[in-house]
Image: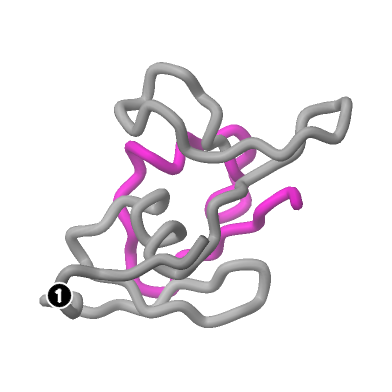
Amino acid sequence: MGAFRVRAPVAPVTIVVNGDSVIAGREDTVASALIASGRWQTRRCPDGEPRGPFCLIGFCQECVAVIDGRRGKRACVTSVADGMRIDLDI
């Protein structure tokens, strides 16, 4: 499945996702920036099933990722920042 933005980011910032530079908007959450860049999976369950953003309001914790070295951060409620590093367990 592809991903797209309705419009270009108003205030672009660069984040690093698994070593790749990704342009995001300063108004984006980590989850929305990941989805807009075509990344729908943030981690795998112990049984290997892929997981990713689901509720997008911080309730379900399906979108947890390693953000700036901190494990278990919810991507859907974390705002992006220039130079932020996101490590997806995929």
Q: Colour scheme in the image?
A: one colour
> Is 70 above or below relative to 3?
above
Q: Does the magenta stretch include residue 86?
A: yes
Name the residue located 64 percent from the left edge and 36 percent from the top edge: 51
- Amino acid type of the residue tagged 1 in the rendering: Arg
Q: Position of residue 42 (x, y in %)?
A: 61, 47
Instruction: Please determine whether, in this image, residue 70 is positioned above or below residue 9.
Output: above
Closer-to-camera residue (2/15): 2
How crowded is the residue under tag 1: few (<14 C-alpha within 10 Å), some, or many (20+)?
A: few
Q: Is mark 1 on a helix, strand or loop?
A: loop
Describe residue 18's horizontal placement relative to residue 83 as left or right. Answer: right
Q: Give the range drawn in magenta.
A: 65-90
> Residue 76's quadrant in the figure?
top left
The one of 71 and 20 positioned closer to us in this rendering:
20
Extreme residue toward the front, this view: 1
Q: Where is residue 75 in the image (x, y as percent from the top left)?
A: 44, 43
Which residue is the site of mark 1?
7
In the rendered view, does 40 fall on the left or right side of 27?
A: right
**Picture quadrant where residue 7 is located:** bottom left
